[in-house]
Amino acid sequence: MRSPLGRWFTRAAAVAAALSVLALSAPGQTPSYKAPRGPDGHPSLNGLWQALNTANWDLQGHAAQPSHVLSLGAQGAEPGGIGVVEGDEIPYLPAALAQKKHNYENRFTDDPEIKCFQPGVPRATYTPFPFQIVQSKDVILISYEFANATRTVYMENAPESPTDYLMGHSVGHWEGDTLVVSVTTLDDRTWFDRAGNYHSDALHVTERYTPISPDAMNYEATIDDPKVYSRPWKISMPLYRHLEKNARRMEFRCVEFVEDLVYGQYYKHPVVVK
């Protein structure tokens, strides 16, 4: 029969052991995940990936909202989301904040997504569609389902960008197991989300792709645009690998879906959709 003091030491030891396990399980304490290597010795990011959040509706935390088209009912409603912005604050300059509010008020007509513009960076990553990464030593190709947008990330011998593009100009390098991509010469016609968050032609995005498990990686994007924001700010989110049998990127060539919307006013005879 153990004494009360002995039982106390036994319980104390058990508590200490449990706390040790919790400490080892805390973020930053577990051994780093080592992703499978590609032929060049760096982590292989090949696969079909997708973000599972509501950032395309609004980068910041937001409540669910009804559809702006009454007849759509719940089908067109906006889901709520906890937000992906660090600190949940986008540091707009005062004049730029006024433009953001104007964008929000006119979001159902002015969002470039409505007209099937290529979504730009970083928005292409968290549209509610998957994207595919095909990796080699010299270049990494990222192919998005929405609007068939594509990007080439130059890992070596990157050419100069001759002009601005909706998807920008991407140059990458490795920092340990993290792929770091600098994206410049981004066309200012894209938005970051359906809430009207936007940028200028001075935008510089720095992306970081870090594998965290066999079927997930962490995505970060630092937004730097001195014409619109008072300081750089960051978004982050997990990306998940599609595991369905025969998973593949489908086509969403939405240009043909918006022809009547964009060009209908120029038709000699109006098109009647039945």
Image (cartoon, rainbow, N blue to C red):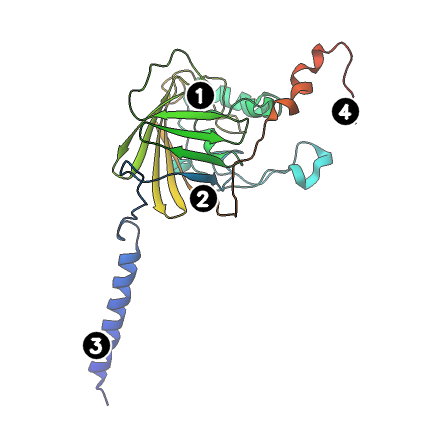
Q: Earlier in the sequence, mark 2 or mark 4?
A: 2
Residue closest to the far bottom: 1
Q: Amino acid at mark 2?
A: Arg
Measured as percent of width and height from the top left, residue 28 is found at 27, 49
Q: Which mark is residue 9?
A: 3
Q: Is residue 8 above or below residue 62?
A: below
Q: Which mark is residue 273?
A: 4
Classify mark 1: helix, strand or loop: loop
Comparing labels 4 and 3, the label whose residue is closer to the camera: 4
Q: Residue at 26%, 52% (x, y): give it.
A: 31
Q: Amino acid at mark 3?
A: Phe
Nearest to the observer: residue 104 or residue 42: 42
Assess whether mark 2 and mark 1 are in contact (beta carbons under 8 angstroms). no
Q: Earlier in the sequence, mark 2 or mark 3?
A: 3
Measured as percent of width and height from the top left, residue 174 is found at 27, 33
Q: Is residue 95 left or right of residue 147?
A: left
